[in-house]
Amino acid sequence: MAAVSRRSGTHEIPAGDPRQEEAQLVRRCLAGERAAQEELYRAHRRQVAANLYRVLGDRTDLDDLVQEVFVIAFRGLARFRGEARLSTWLYRICVNVALGRIRSRARRPPPILRAEPVGEEPGRSPETPHRALERRRARDRVYRALEQLPPKKRIVLYLHEIEGRSLKDIAYLVDANPVTVRTRLHYAKRDFYRIVAEDGEGEA
Amino acid sequence: MSRHVPPHRFADAAAGRLPARAIERDRRHAARCSRCAGARDRVLASREAMAEVAAAAPPELGWDHIGARIHWSTSRQQRAAARRGRPAWRWAAGAGVLAVGAVAALTWTSRGRAPAPRAELPAEVTAPAPAPEPAPPAALAGVVTFAAGEVALDGAPLAFDRLLGPGSVLRTGDGRVGVQFAAGSGFALAPGSELRVLAFDERRIELAVSGEVDVDVTRRRPGQSLAIVAGDHRVVVRGTAFRVGHRDGELEVTCTRGKVVVTGGAEEVDVRAGERFRVVSEAFSEAALRSVPLSPEERQILEQSLRVPLLPAFPGARALLDTTSALEVEAAADRSITVDGVAIGEGSFQLRVMRGRHHVAADGDEGAWIETAAARDRTVVAPPPSPTPSAPGRRRELAEAVEAGDRVHRCLEPLAKHGLVEGSYAVFDVGIAADGSQAHLNVLDSNLSPAIQRCLRQAVDAVQLPAGAAARFRYRLAF
């Protein structure tokens, strides 16, 4: 049985649970073992970058933000209680970092998503330029609408509508009460889809 | 017609979050309401796009570099915490160790950088590496591309074809010197400065400077780190053009392109293009921990004056010596020289040029074409003397009259507020008539903004000399 220190007592993790390995990794990191820190960074860096990239829809300073997430994580690793997966805990930090980023650029022009196009499925015929343009417009419309939401609403909407996360998960990630999240989500959805519906209303 | 359907209901319907009856009611409404039908189409298209957003692949990043920065930030914090309470003299020693550790960590991280990015964080510098010893990185050599005035290399007057390597010491008296060490990369040392080459290989370049150095780094080798050491501070290059001034314990870093990071002890400050960072008395204080933007005028002056003489190609130091020539210009101190149309400087200097024909002109005259024949050859050019070499008396009269007034100083007030007056200059082509009036007055060269040049020209133009000999001469107003 592995044990991870908690704020109040000890949180027991059953043997065979992948969290047990994570708990060991965290302990090694806390002991200052360089190899463990490397392992943690290597295991989660791409997911952290992907989370930030998708939430923000922009790769500007992405490397700085990834660095910020891991620095916060390593400095606060002692506070990791093991009640969630390490990836979820890192996602929570990503959300906070992204929120800070959104707030800091609130007055800048909205970014255009520069994601790599999703790869074609095997055996599927290549899409027409017109279809590709439509898809890009739709993606841009999503981020334009997200940009117009207040940061907290934006994050909640992103996590629910795009990531498909449950209210309970979102409550943990944004460190809020589930009822608060549900209320916030209701207004976020109403505003977001209204903006989407009105965006391009005059287009043919 | 019933009320319009709120757009988010179309999303809820698509996600199966509405009962079938409600979905059917909305569908019927949209069938006869073009506005709601359009809204539904856009909402559904957006939901499709959301699925793509959720699956969007993140861009590939410099993982090793990020890892090194994380390690640097976290270990620095740990060590800073451990250092609290130690005697002050140990703080300074610790800061030095941290600085060396950071550079070594960066170096270590990039050692194995291959086409596929590595995932490892840098190893501790203090820990012995268990792996076999890697081959030592190849040493670099710097080629002197420009030299004017009093310049010494390793304690002896500079020989133009001598190379700089690890341990070299460059000193300038009243002169300037430019050195190139890679394609598009080099530095220029200002008068009254000293530069020591602490490390100079394909992994790490480290230059300690006292005085002022301009650095232009267009490209670095993959994984190569470059740092300027100025007292207790380090200026770490990210790919950039910048100036470091370090005199009497004061550090000033100004950046025209890219970004540099200044570190001192446990603190670090980013200096981006168009920003200046200044520290007084070798210590980072809370108030000083940020860079400030340059005014447009300051930035223009900096960009005009921050020029490192670089050759268009760098096939290697020795190969460069074999394929280029030294062009030596011997001219009076007040004559502005251009080579191939580019203003190089005033007075005598040596310039490294590609072999072939070059056009050398003085004070905007017609100039002459010079053939630099063989490699490593020295071609001496002496521009014809000024039109009226007997004008020193009139020039002295003009200088005294200009300096007696305060108009010139008023022109420089915008710069004086920022302490940027020193080093600025303007060279005038002056024609004095026999009655003492100015027959013509042109600005030939200056590192000042056009507005200040105009102001200075008006200040000089306002001077009335006593009647005497007519003369034409160059007048250099330097600050």
Image: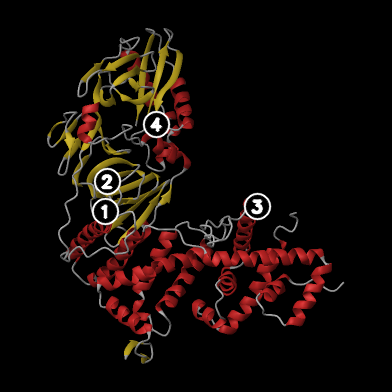
Q: Residue at x 23, y 18 (%)?
A: B379
Query: Where is mark 2, residue-wise?
Result: B246
Please tell me which of labels 4 and 2 falls first in the chain: 2
Circle 2 SS class: strand
Can you tell which mark lies on residue B233? 1
The answer to whether mark 1 and mark 2 are in CB contact below 8 A is yes
Of B1 and B293, the residue lying toward us: B1
Of A95 and B308, the residue lying toward us: A95
Q: Amino acid at mark 4?
A: Asn
What is the C-alpha distance between the residues marked 1 and 2? 10 Å
Q: Is residue B58 above or below residue B217?
A: below
The answer to whether residue A195 shows anywhere in this view is no
What is the C-alpha distance between the residues marked 3 and 1? 56 Å
Quadrant of the image containing the N terminus of chain A: bottom left
Examine the image and state in which quarter residue B290 appears. bottom left
Could you say where residue B443 lies in the image, as x and y percent from the top left? 43, 22
